Image (cartoon, rainbow, N blue to C red):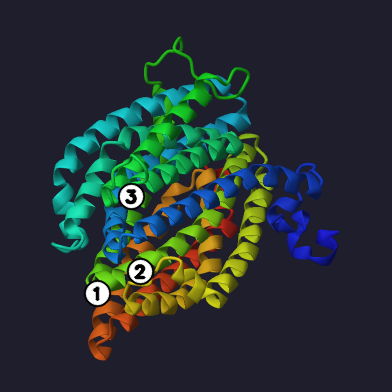
Amino acid sequence: MLKKFFPYFDTRRMLPRSLKNTAGDLPPGREMYKEYIRIAVPSVCEMVLISLINMMDTVMVSSIGTDAVAAVGLVGQPRMIMLSLFFALNTGITAVVARRKGEGRQADANATVRTSIIMILVLSAVLMALLLPLSRALMIFAGAEAGRTLESSTEYFAILGWALPFQALSMGLCAAQRGVGNTRLTMQVNISSNIVNIICNYLLINGIGPFPKLGVRGAAIATVIGLVVGFFLSLRAMFHSHGSFLSLSRHDSWKPDIPSGKALLQVGSSAMVEQLAMRIGFFAYARIVADLGTDAFAAHQICGQFLNLSFSFADGLGIAGTSLVGQMLGKKRRDLAHIYGTLAQRFSLAIGLGLAAVCILFRAPLVNMFISGNDSEAVRHMAVNVMIVLGLIQPLQMVAVVSSGALRGAGDVKYTARVMLITVTCIRPVLALLGVYVAGTVFGRSDIALVAAWSATLCDMTVRLTLMLRRYRSEKWHSIKV
């Protein structure tokens, strides 16, 4: 019925001409939608609920004041740089495990998981030794102001740094589960972790009952507790998963598996370039915005919550596409891989258009959730203006993220890395610099400069979407070996 009235969603129309004569028997469209939705719905729910919980986290911190919101926000990009190596490795874990699932190589998939755990532990130890002593210097470089945000942001970063091994291991184990399509489990793990975080936030930020009032420090401790809970839940799922495709045991060989390590590095090395390009670009962008002052950065941080929410929708849909693309290529079904990747794109466009309407039409009440009565009206004014640009970004970001996810599922991470290097590392910071320093100087108003900086993100997304779709439609990713 859907394809009768909306041919855009007909699965057979999603098959490119080059594959129509060589395609095998295609499952009914209803079955393909059912399989995609089976993986996508838990993944989307997981990502969206986590984003909403993180948004609640920011709302709770905002009860202390906009300085606290800015302090927590300043930690964001340096922390993401710390995690970028693990994001890259997780891309490799998901892609390799998905391909082994499609090939039916269960023992190799589990060897990949064990090898990745060893790699994560080594990386965690090295990063903690290098970055924790530099906490204060990193926050100064990020734009923290002495007397307002420097002390709180430094303490917040340092506390989270001690939880790095727990967070990284939980992320890696969940990445493996997503590779085999077990998104329901990862949803349960991450939502439970974040609910614990919110409860502890409530108790520790303002001091409820016998608990001390710790402010920003309490928010950091609450986050650590949530991360530790998530780690034990994800680890328990691996060790108590008899009969599942993925499982761990004390009796397994924990010696690093060389072929698995090579496969992880093949995908992960290019993904690392992509992640570093992204994080350096995001850090530079945030640093440029931070120069507009604490009020402008607080407004930027508020709008960033809604940008993260839309990203969570796209990430959830993209994870399903990544898993199915990898599995279908492992089964030598290029036709099904292409259809599932296109399904993800079209779902994401529809959701992106809906989110755009919400951001633009309800921008004032959405911003007011983060602004208390005693806070500056300037923060509210700047955030409401930025929300219009944010609405325009929504559909572009959704489709770009999902398209890149399909390419990563095929192992085409070198291309996605080059695109991120061009757009996030170069286009966005350069245009933001022009917006902040040129427009800000001409008009002498930080609100106009902030809108100009967000317009740089809009340009970044436009170029990124164009390049991702061009690569996807070229079909070169169909033949990549992992």
> Callout 1, which amino acid?
Leu
| Res. 482 in view | no
For the residues carrying marks 1 and 3, which lies nearer the camera in this image? 3
Asked if marks 1 and 3 touch (Cβ < 8 Å), the reply is no
Amino acid type at mark 3: Ile
Q: Which residue corresponds to the image point at 45% horizontal and 40% vertical from the top-left?
A: 196
Q: Position of residue 370 (x, y in %)?
A: 41, 66
Q: What element carries label 2?
A: helix
Q: In which quarter of the image is residue 89?
A: top left
User: What residue appears at the point 66 percent right and 49 percent down from the top-left corner?
Assistant: 340
Q: Choose mark 2 or mark 3, whichever is in front.
A: 3
Residue indicated by mark 2: 300
Instruction: Give the residue at the far front of this rendering.
Output: 209
Q: In this view, does 202 lie above or below 391?
A: above
Which comes before the other along the chain, label 1 or label 3? 3
Instruction: For marks 2 and 3, give the CA distance.
Output: 22 Å
**Relative vertical location of residue 79 with respect to residue 170 in this rendering, above or below:** below
SS for tag 1? loop
Tell me, yes or no, whether the two marked residues, 2 and 1, touch with CB atoms within 8 Å: yes
Q: Residue at x 42, y 49 (%)?
A: 414
The residue to which callout 1 is attached is 292
* Residue occupied by mark 3: 205
